[in-house]
């Protein structure tokens, strides 16, 4: 529940109008807003009624003090603050008279935002041209991607047009070049009229009932009326992979590939194309949005090699192209949509399958929340608050579809951050402990190195002998245990750590590797694994010796393990050659089938306090590619949450569901990377605003 406080204080200050003007006493107004963070969603407005001020009033200065419980840039919370009247509709910030705008779309998490006293100061006089009786605080938060129903047919290098609730998929390539088109109604994809000429590398413009398909290694342009396609005016050149924006009767096509990257841009009037001023950079494999008087293009490749993506952004003002602020990351074959001053970039490739999203506000790009499945050569449509991404390439042409919608602070509360790097890169490591006191145990690169984490940095500690990788672990940084593994042959060794040294303990019943681990130093669980075959066998440790536990329902290896000896999970894994989505739950005696993962995976990271609360991220998915997909478990079902920052597999894990740590692993090479996962508490966002008038 939002609580808003309002108060007035008078203070005598002197203000001189002109050199010899009258001396008047300004009125000092103080307003405090206390807003529950979980109530803040996209477009949340908090108007506060003030006493009416004279029409000739002038804003003297303003300052804002924000005390916020979250410092998570992925939340993307922004605030606009202004003074206006209550005479107009209150559904959007523009409906208030913002002639007295104090600030607009201020990122509440900007580093260095506040002065040494904790205030955000806005000083300078502003004329108030209307009677003012309302302070308006308007919040926005970054959007979030969610899975939607898939395309009916797979496709990559395809085009898109329309909106999130009335989208259009145009052509593309699957096992061959396609004339296939599909329409989306906001829920499902259905058949649409086919192109007259099958094509890929094309670009789409317009709406579901008035669209263009432009180029695709051809000059051919086709127009769609919601039922069928007809031939439109041809492009000036045979082009592919250009950037487009506008509508069916007023479109631009910029750049693209002929026999090399092109800097040409051209305009369509519904009948024919005419040349416009050229881009500053010859570019292809990029995306455009906006319209013919306010266009935007971004990313792509300026060389003849697709291996050299760029971060270039250019804006069009109806006459000329100019360089704008660059993307945060280089990218090609990405998706995009929106307007020149409100654009969205998503997925693509700069090496691998990117899941990155960026939002543009007309001045600069900021990092958005990741797509759930990284991919490239996809299409998209819509706006920054209602977008659609579909198709693309993930080891094969895909039918994946995702929607981007406004979130709220409650739905965006979970996020990943980079921690301190390990001193030595490693993979096939294990780990235990907490996010602020973790232990990384050996790995394939060296086989004996161990390191301790203090919440910010790693330090080396005692080596583990004999050397091994593919181990499992349980316990804490000062009371840890590791068991099993491999180094030229399977290992049955168990070793305990006391915070400084390792000591040998009782061996496993069966030497094994690629097993899962859970529990504590005195009550550990070894889950499945591999001997000379996949096994169902599990073992329980009492701090000295191992005994047989209940068997898994299906033989499994390279799974994630979480929980305690009496309340454990086996998450995903390799069940005889597949990327498993199966979860098994252990009650201390037997295993039962639990909720199914949204994304089957093996070699995944996993941790959690019990079978009722766990998290998994990363691992290998279908196609043997690493993922950054993250899911949380509540004892019944898995829910997708914000992706990790880097797609990795085969590393160590520590912590619990709402405060997890992953480290080491591989994205094709051994890593030193550490990532921290946090769910901030849902507290209050306090705004204390002071301003003066005369």
Image: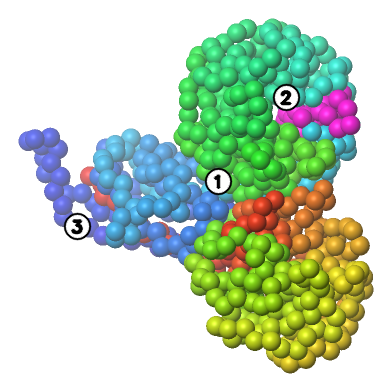
Q: In this view, does 417 lie above or below 332?
A: below
Q: For this view, does 125 lie left or right of residue 473?
A: left
What's the distance in space between the residues labelled 2 and 3, CA to CA? 60 Å
Measured as percent of width and height from the top left, residue 670 is found at: 65, 56
Look at the image and give the residue range highlighted in magenta. Answer: 157-182
The label nearer to you, 1 versus 2, is 1
Q: Is residue 337 above or below residue 123?
A: above
Q: For this view, does 588 lie left or right of residue 320?
A: right
Residue 162 colored magenta? yes
Residue at x 80% of width, y 88% of height = 546
Measured as percent of width and height from the top left, residue 406 is found at: 62, 48
Disc 3 crowd rating (10 Å Cα; few below 14, some 14-19, many 20+) is few
Residue at x 58% of width, y 16% of height = 263
Q: What element carries label 3?
A: loop
Give residue 377's quadrant in the image. Answer: top right
Give residue 172's quadrant in the image. Answer: top right
What's the distance in space between the residues labelled 1 and 3, CA to CA? 43 Å
Residue annotated with mark 3: 11
Q: Is mark 1 on a helix, strand or loop?
A: strand
Q: For this view, does 389 lie left or right of residue 31?
A: right
Disc 2 crowd rating (10 Å Cα; few below 14, some 14-19, many 20+) is many
Residue annotated with mark 1: 367
Residue 487 colored magenta? no
Q: Is residue 670 visible?
A: yes
Measured as percent of width and height from the top left, residue 628 is found at: 69, 54
Residue annotated with mark 2: 204
Measured as percent of width and height from the top left, residue 135 is found at: 40, 49
Screen quadrant of the N terminus: bottom right
What's the distance in space between the residues labelled 1 and 2, CA to CA? 25 Å
* Label 2 vs 3, first from the N-terminus: 3
* Label 1 vs 2, first from the N-terminus: 2
* Label 1 vs 3, first from the N-terminus: 3
């Amino acid at each position: 529940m939002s609580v808003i406080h309002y108060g007035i204080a008078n203070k005598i200050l002197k203000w001189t109008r002109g050199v010899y003007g009258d001396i008047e006493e300004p009125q000092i107004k103080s307003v405090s807003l206390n807003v529950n963070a979980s109530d803040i969603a996209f477009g949340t407005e908090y108007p506060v009624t003030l006493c009416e001020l004279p029409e000739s009033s002038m804003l003297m200065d303003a300052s804002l003090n924000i005390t916020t419980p979250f410092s998570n840039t992925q939340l993307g919370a922004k605030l606009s603050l202004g003074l206006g009247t209550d005479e107009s509709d209150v559904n959007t910030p523009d409906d208030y008279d913002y002639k007295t705008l104090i600030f607009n779309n201020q990122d509440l998490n900007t580093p260095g935002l506040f002065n040494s006293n904790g205030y955000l100061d806005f000083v300078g006089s502003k004329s108030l041209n209307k009677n003012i009786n309302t302070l308006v605080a308007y919040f926005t938060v970054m959007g979030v991607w969610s899975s939607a129903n898939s395309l009916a047919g797979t496709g990559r290098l395809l085009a898109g047009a329309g909106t999130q609730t009335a989208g259009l998929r145009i052509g593309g390539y699957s096992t061959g070049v396609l004339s296939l088109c599909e329409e989306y109604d906001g829920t499902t994809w259905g058949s649409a009229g086919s192109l007259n000429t099958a094509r890929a590398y094309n670009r789409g413009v317009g709406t579901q009932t008035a669209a263009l398909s432009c180029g695709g290694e051809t000059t051919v342009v086709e127009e769609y009326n919601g039922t069928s396609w007809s031939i439109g005016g041809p492009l000036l050149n045979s082009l592919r992979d250009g950037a487009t924006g506008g509508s069916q009767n007023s479109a631009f096509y910029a750049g693209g590939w002929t026999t090399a990257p092109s800097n040409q841009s051209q305009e369509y009037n519904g009948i024919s194309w005419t040349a416009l001023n050229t881009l500053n950079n010859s570019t292809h494999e990029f995306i455009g949005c906006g319209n013919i008087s306010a266009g935007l293009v971004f990313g792509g490749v300026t060389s003849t090699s697709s291996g050299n993506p760029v971060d270039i952004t250019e804006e069009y003002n109806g006459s000329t192209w100019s360089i704008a602020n660059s993307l945060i990351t280089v990218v090609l074959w990405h998706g995009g949509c929106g307007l020149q001053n409100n654009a969205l970039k998503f997925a693509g490739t700069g090496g691998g399958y990117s899941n990155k999203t960026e939002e543009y506000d007309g001045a600069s790009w900021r990092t958005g929340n990741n797509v759930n499945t990284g991919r490239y050569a996809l299409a998209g449509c819509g706006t920054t608050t209602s977008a659609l991404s579909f198709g693309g390439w993930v080891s094969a042409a895909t039918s994946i579809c995702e929607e981007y919608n406004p979130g709220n602070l409650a739905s965006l509360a979970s996020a990943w951050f980079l921690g301190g790097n390990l001193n030595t890169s490693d993979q096939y490591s294990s780990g235990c402990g907490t996010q602020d006191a973790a232990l990384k145990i050996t790995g394939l690169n060296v086989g004996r190195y161990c390191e301790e984490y203090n919440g910010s940095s790693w330090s080396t500690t005692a080596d583990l002998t004999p050397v091994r990788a593919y181990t499992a672990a349980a316990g804490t940084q000062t009371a840890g245990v590791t068991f099993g593994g491999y180094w030229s042959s399977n290992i049955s060794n168990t070793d305990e750590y006391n915070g400084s040294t390792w000591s040998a303990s009782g061996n496993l019943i069966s030497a094994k590797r690629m097993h899962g681990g859970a529990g504590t130093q005195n009550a550990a669980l070894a889950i499945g694994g591999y001997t000379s075959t996949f096994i169902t066998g599990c073992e329980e440790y009492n701090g000295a010796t191992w005994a047989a536990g209940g068997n898994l329902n299906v033989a499994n290896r390279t799974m994630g393990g979480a929980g305690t000896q009496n309340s454990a999970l086996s998450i995903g894994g390799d069940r005889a050659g597949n990327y498993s989505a199966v979860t098994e739950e252990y009650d201390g005696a037997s295993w039962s089938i639990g909720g199914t993962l949204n994304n089957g995976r093996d070699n995944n990271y996993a941790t959690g306090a019990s079978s009722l609360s766990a998290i998994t991220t990363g691992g290998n998915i279908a196609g043997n590619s690493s993922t950054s997909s993250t899911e949380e478990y509540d004892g019944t079902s898995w829910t997708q949450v914000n992706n990790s920052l880097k797609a990795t597999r085969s590393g160590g894990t520590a912590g619990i569901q709402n405060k997890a740590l992953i480290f080491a692993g591989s994205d094709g090479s051994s890593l030193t990377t550490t990532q921290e996962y946090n769910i901030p508490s849902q507290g209050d966002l306090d705004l204390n605003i002071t301003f003066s008038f005369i």
